[in-house]
Image (spheres, rainbow, N blue to C red):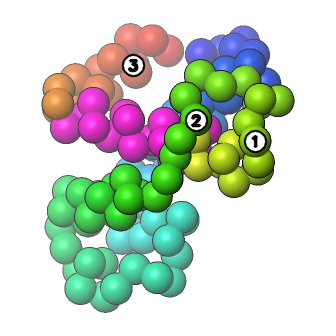
Amino acid sequence: MLGSNERQHTWLDEGLNSYFQFRYEAQKYRTNSMFGDAIPAEIKALPEKEFLDRTYGAMSSIPMNSAIETPSDKFTSSDDYSMTSYAKTALWLYILENSVGREKMDNAFKTLL
């Protein structure tokens, strides 16, 4: 990912970071920076995988209409930019992780870097 054009491919920077940030927040603190204090205590008490399933489930109900590969100057609003570049990409990667497994995801990222 080193050397990617962040303005042309926002998801390569923002979305990949968000995916790993959400994992870290869930593992260490049972929180998610998108939802903050709005996460109910009973959700925070869940095991990490279930917590992530719930937070990503909530994310999937938020409208994210633009394509992930939209250049930064083509978004219609800052909300559209944020939701697509950060949240939609993280959600897509989480769906992929659930399909192939976390170990394969981690190995793929290690191989890329």
Residue range (magenta): 85-98
Q: Amino acid at mark 1?
A: Thr
Q: Amino acid at mark 3?
A: Lys
> Residue at horizontal 59%, vertical 22%?
69
Q: Is residue 50 left or right of residue 110?
A: left
Residue hosting label 2: 66
Counting from the top left corner in percent of width and height, residue 107 is at 29, 20
Where 40 falls versus 53 (above or below)? below
Q: Amino acid at mark 2?
A: Ser
Disc 2 element = loop
Instruction: Name which of mark 3 and mark 1 comes first in the sequence.
Output: 1
Q: Quadrant of residue 4?
A: top right
Quick one: label 1, few (<14), some, or many (20+) residues within 10 Å? few
Counting from the top left corner in percent of width and height, residue 80 is at 66, 47
Where 85 falls versus 37 (above or below)? above
Instruction: Name which of mark 3 and mark 2 comes first in the sequence.
Output: 2
Q: Quadrant of residue 47?
A: bottom left
Q: Quadrant of residue 73?
A: top right
The disc at residue 76 is 1
Q: CA distance from mark 2 to mark 1?
A: 9 Å
Disc 1 element = loop
Any part of residue 24 in sight: no
Which quarter of the image is occupied by the N terminus? Answer: top right
Counting from the top left corner in percent of width and height, residue 110 is at 39, 19
> Residue at horizontal 30%, vertical 78%?
44
> Which residue lies most toward the bottom here?
41
The disc at residue 110 is 3
